[in-house]
Amino acid sequence: MKVLAILYKGGDAAKQEPRLLGAVENELGIRSWLESQGHEYLVSDDKEGPNSFLHKNIVDADIVITTPFHPGYLTKELLDKAKNLKLCVTAGVGSDHVDLNAAVEKGLEVLEVTGSNVVSVAEHVVMSILLLVRNFVPAHEMIERGDWQVSDIARNAFDLEGKVVGTIGAGRIGYRVLQRLQPFNCKEFLYYDYNGLKPDAEKAINARRVEDLKEFVSQCDVVTINAPLHEGTRGLINADLLKHFKKDAWLVNTARGAICNAEDVAAAVKSGQLNGYAGDVWNVQPAPKEHPWRYMKNPLQGGNGMVPHYSGTTLDAQQRYASGTKQILENFFNNKPQEPANIIIAKKGYVTKAYGQR
Ligand code: NAI
């Protein structure tokens, strides 16, 4: 079979660090295994436009592997050209780079390595919440500049203790975020999710479900987004909803950039409606140099905790999603059943309940 992989370019780092398995250079560590079984394996980071490696090679590929960190966008138009395609594998978690409705129409299977990086992301969310609330980034920048003016930082630094923290999406990551925040003595933990938690799970993290989104955001000091990107979440955080946020709230989004309207969020940070925004996901990746999230600041010159998309690609996570990808391929080649939690779309349609209510 012809297997394509779209991964990010690792450069010198990937040559020096073989555990960067998710980079083009290290090819998820599966080349010799695939070739020993007679499969053809083509790997590149070149994914945009009709002359790209992805667009040219997808026409006769059987399997496409792509990573959310450098997503090969599998649009309906591109899937129409992929006459032999049977399986799309996400090396990681989050398969929104595939037009999932088109994949259903075509009877494709879409699988991801569920759970592979949920702890990695949950830890990043906790870090991002703390760095916003405690005004860390401008404090560090001040030190690098050679300055020292405690009051300029302290005037916008708070404790997380006593604050209300809420997650949009209380699945694997959202749940783990609230679990990890238990010792901080927050005032309350809230969640908004059409899939409610079981009572014992809710109790274990002291979480209260709020069913109306506007009501939910109006109660939170910190909102963290942990839901997949789909028709029901695209553009969910926009100027209209931001009006219902508490003034000075902090927003952390490590789910997908397009869940937020980029301009509306940047304007809310700039005006001080949001005290800060942090995350690692962008509506286009790689993010263009002029993207407003790179440079936005609140009126006190802080409130920006943006980084490139890396929270779920720690070296620990890469080992897990590389081996999970191999397991998915092995099952596929041998006609063995897939791990149910990994199936986003089976030939018969949606299996997951996380990509919208159907
Ligand atoms: P999950 O499937 O365990 O949980 C997602 C939860 O979101 C589900 O409970 C679902 O019901 C809920 N949800 C879906 N639509 C919603 C809506 N409109 N409103 C409220 N809740 C909604 O997924 P998991 O593992 O927690 O991952 C969540 C997302 O995080 C992924 O889909 C991916 O986009 C993102 N992610 C980001 C990574 C990164 O490196 N930044 C790495 C891994 C995941």
Image (spheres, rainbow, N blue to C red):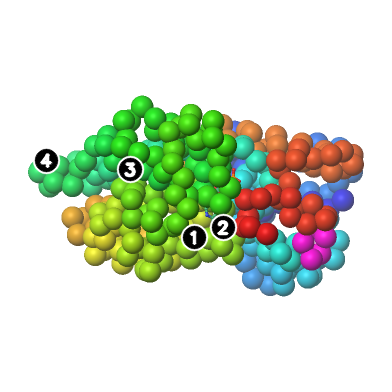
| Mark 2 and mark 1: Cα distance apart in space | 6 Å
For the point 47% across and 53% down, the residue is 211
For the point 10% across and 43% down, the residue is 151
For the point 13% across and 46% down, the residue is 155
Mark 4: amino acid: Val
Mark 3: amino acid: Val
Position in image of residue 306 (x %, y %): 38, 51
Report if the beta carbon of the residue with label 2 is closer than 8 angstroms to ligand 1. yes
Mark 1: amino acid: Ile
Q: Which mark is residue 164?
A: 3
Q: Quadrant of the C terminus?
A: bottom right
Circles 2 and 3 in contact, beta carbons < 8 Å: no
Our reading of the magenta stretch's main secondary structure is: helix
Residue indicated by mark 4 = 150
Along the viewing direction, whichever of 204 and 169 lies nearer the viewer: 204
Circles 4 and 1 in contact, beta carbons < 8 Å: no
Residue indicated by mark 2 = 229
Q: Which residues are magenta?
A: 104-108
